[in-house]
Image (cartoon, rainbow, N blue to C red):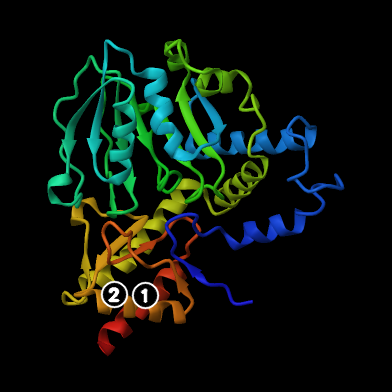
Amino acid sequence: MVRTTNFNAGPAALPLEVLQKAQNEFVDFNGAGMSVMELSHRSKEYDAVHQKAKALLKELMEIPDDYEILFLQGGASLQFSMIPMNFLSKEKTAHFIMTGAWSEKALAEAKLFGSTSVIATSEDDTYKYIPDIPEIPADGAYLHLTSNNTIFGTQWQQFPDSPIPLVADMSSDILSRKIDVSKFGIIYAGAQKNLGPSGVTVVIIKKDLLSKENEQVAKILKYSTHAKANSLYNTPPTFAIYMLSLVLEWLKEKGGVAEIEKRNRKKAGILYRAIDESGGFYKGHAREDSRSNMNVTFTLKNDELTKAFIAKAKEERMSGLGGHRSVGGCRASIYNAVSVEDCEKLAAFMKTFREEH
């Protein structure tokens, strides 16, 4: 079988080695005579998977001891609601930095639970850049941002020092670069881009926040419930967590986050050079100082040419290059599992297509 080069934004590419290991273990996991999908989430066999996933995540991200690691469901979208549901009180205001569609969705959900404020936004220029941050109000409930914006192709280069809990949706760039976890109150991420398949959401939350949850919240929607139960309050997405553990194992074997960050910078550089050296044939959407190393967004001069580009790329077994419907153009999502060679293949194709048109 010839593998298709996968530039989809999510669910996204998974390492081939991970897929092959899962394939080998699929019917009989560690001699259990059952698939990992069939194991009880209370079994010792599954418990080893669960604990390995937590331990690897803690090691790779250098997560301090005063944080809980939770495996939840509902994607990042449920976190848009769970966070204000638990931490936005009547006396406080939740502050937001707007950099795209996902921060808009998080803001819309928070408005259902209390007072909100937008302290910075780049909406004025189609979210092409990460805005400058004014003074952050010290009496707020929390400050929310989206670390990487899949649709517009922008990424935070540095995170603000916040006097209130900093909450970050890192769904599309978690584990792609080194970060200081201690700067954040909550980090959350859907797995389907850098961590594994869809179905599990990782939440990293500072333990002292658990005692500050609002009281009138359903038990299953409280972070403390899942922390006390080691993410086993209800049946977790066991297969997705198993796959996550394999991806983390693969990342460690590749040299950890520091090495994957170098690789990601190299990959992005290859594609941005193809854009910048095209004489305007390709135009990047994001401002240069805000460019994402995960989602490279660009346009061609008209829709007809864009459709031809995407169709020809598909013939060359490159998938997922269409831009989001709200922006159009093209987008190459180059998450951790996408190789340098994949990016070189796309850059060569971009050059050939430009020469032909």
Q: Residue furthest front?
A: 112
Q: Residue at x 31, y 60 (%)?
A: 325
Q: Give amino acid for label 1.
A: Ile
Answer with the quarter of the image where residue 140 lies: top left
45 in relation to 277, above or below = above
Residue 13: % across, % down: 51, 60
Residue 190: % across, % down: 48, 42
User: Disc 2 residue type?
Assistant: Thr
Tell me what residue is drawn at x 59 percent, y 38 percent: 56
| Classed neighbour count for the residue bearing mark 1: other residues with Cα under 10 Å, few (<14), some (14–19), many (≥20) | some
Residue drawn at the location 48% of the way across and 30% of the way down: 204
Residue that badge 1 annotates: 310
Residue 306's disc is 2
Residue 65 showing in the rendered view: no
Q: Is residue 60 left or right of residue 183?
A: right
Most extreme residue toward the bottom is 356
**In which quarter of the view is residue 132 placed?**
top left
Binning the other alpha carbons within 10 Å of mark 2 as few (below 14), some (14 to 19) or many (20 upward) gives some
Q: Is residue 332 above or below residue 39?
A: below
Location of residue 295 with respect to 225 vertically, above or below: below
294 or 255, which is in the foreground?
Answer: 294
Q: Is residue 67 left or right of residue 106?
A: right
Task: Locate residue 315: give its quadrant.
Answer: bottom left
| Residue 326 visible within the image | yes
